Image (cartoon, rainbow, N blue to C red):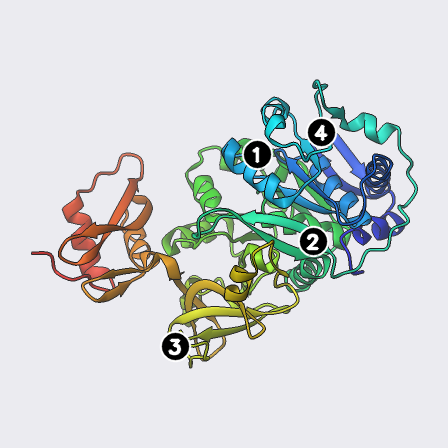
Amino acid sequence: MYTLGDIPRKNALHYPDKEAIVFEETRLTYEKLNQRINRLANALTKMGFNPGDRVTVFSENTHKYLEVYFAAAKLGMSVTPINFRLSDDEIIHIVSDSEASCFFAGDGYEARAGKMRERLQAINAWVAFDNNTPGFIVYEDMLNDASEKEPDVTVDEDDLAVLMYTGGTTGLPKGVMLSHRNIMAGVISANLMSNITSDDTTCFVLPLFHVSFWPAFCLLLAGGKVAINRKSDLNEILRIIQDERCTHMNAVPTVYGWLLQFGNVDAYNLTSLKLLSYAGSPFPLEILKQCIEKFGPIFAQGYGATETAGGAISLLRKEDHILSGTKSKLLASAGKASLCSEIRIMDENGLALPIHETGEIAVKGKHVMMGYWKNPELTEKALRGGWYYAGDMGYMDEDGYLYLVDRKADMIVTGGENIYPKEVEDVLYEHPAVFMAAVVSAPDKKWGERVQAVVVLKPDQLVTEEELIAFYKKNGRIQMPQRH
């Protein structure tokens, strides 16, 4: 199995009557899902689209989003997903730069998409997932008029599958080219390392426009079930876990932090959960400990990037999430290199550093992107000597555990000291009154830069600026220069 399109095709054969996807009132077996995917693929062919063409999707989570991913994959087309939180100008830039020729708009986004039509002349077909909108083809009408036959198209594992735009810290969004091989390498590695099987169900909560789409592909590859949540509503997430007996959920640390503070959590039966994975941003250590105490020792961390196709660069397993004893120090790490990944810590000259020395994290593996779309200069900078330079700073210990320090671009240089915001944030989270903390750089006439923190307190808690500064001075590993 080498391409995304093989996932529904193979499992329609092996699990025809097994539920594959649940979304609101829609429940699809593997056979029904594959039939719908084939109908969409054949409809696109009938409309004149060819291998190498690109489609774009502007929608909240829905089963139709996944159908577009898979139908395009079967045709050798690629998908550019759109972050619906972006401005119209940003969206127009991405769609134009990607050279997409077909635009899918989700429920409630058709009107906004319609306003962009005059500035997107290269789009040949506008498709509405749900609502009958002037100038748009209705998605279900496309499927009803098309054949269920498997498309007769040969797709290579090195063909472009997803062109995903990411902003990061470098200005305008840049297109990350992900091949079928890139995505499948990450998905297969995640399945093997997380022991995902056909008996598992994931509660899918993160946006399908993001590289966090990997749990959906993982579960469908294994013959499991994907229960899709449209957007982050905590009651709905908990209901899905309870009603669908979900065994897995992947979320960012912020979502787990919200659940800790959510009064209705105990009203739901969450005993089916076996694995709660997290990624996307550092998990404040104190909040992670509280989550383990609340939900059990079922957490696992995946550290990855859009450029690694959602495939983990490293993985901190459930077994390493220990609250006491000598292994408790591992909660601060990002785990060991995943099955698909090799990791080195590089200095500024591209030379590997020894253990415990901080440098830039570099990654090698089949999950690493093809490059940046129409940007050879940036590609050459990021991919050097067969390694992807992630832009994150970190170090390795003697046991092969990776420790993230911070984004290279986020480092604050104050009074000659290199300060990484995460190091300061971790200390602030230890204060019993602090709910959230974010540390940023601010200009300083004397020191060049100074460390500045924005803090949100827990309900009914009070603490002064002076008290937090004193707390940091007492507990912080890195001490900032004295201000006079």
Could you tell me which secondary element the residue under label 4 belongs to?
strand
Q: Amino acid at mark 4?
A: Trp
**Tag 4 near tag 2, CB within 8 Å:** no
Residue 189 vs 399, above or below: the answer is above
**Tag 3 near tag 4, CB within 8 Å:** no
Q: Name the residue beneath numbered marker 4.
A: 126
Q: CA distance from mark 2 to mark 1?
A: 20 Å
Q: Amino acid at mark 3?
A: His
Q: Earlier in the sequence, mark 4 or mark 2?
A: 4
Left or right of 33? Residue 323 is left
**Classed neighbour count for the residue bearing mark 3: other residues with Cα under 10 Å, few (<14), some (14–19), many (≥20):** some
Q: Observer-nearest residue: 346 or 174?
A: 174
Could you tell me which secondary element the residue under label 1 belongs to?
loop
Q: Name the residue beneath numbered marker 1.
A: 231
Residue at the image position 56 percent from the left and 56 percent from the top: 375
Residue 99 vs 231, above or below: the answer is below
Q: CA distance from mark 4 to mark 2?
A: 30 Å
**Tag 4 near tag 1, CB within 8 Å:** no
Q: Earlier in the sequence, mark 2 or mark 1?
A: 2
- Choose mark 3 or mark 4, whichever is in front: 4
Residue 180, can we see it? yes
The N terminus - image quarter: bottom right
Q: CA distance from mark 1 to mark 3?
A: 40 Å
Could you tell me which secondary element the residue under label 2 belongs to?
helix
Please provide percent x and percent y for residue 413: 25, 61
Q: Earlier in the sequence, mark 3 or mark 4?
A: 4
The C terminus - image quarter: bottom left
Please provide percent x and percent y for residue 189: 66, 64
Please provide percent x and percent y for residue 293: 45, 52
**Classed neighbour count for the residue bearing mark 4: other residues with Cα under 10 Å, few (<14), some (14–19), many (≥20):** many
Q: Which mark is residue 356?
A: 3
Q: Earlier in the sequence, mark 3 or mark 2?
A: 2
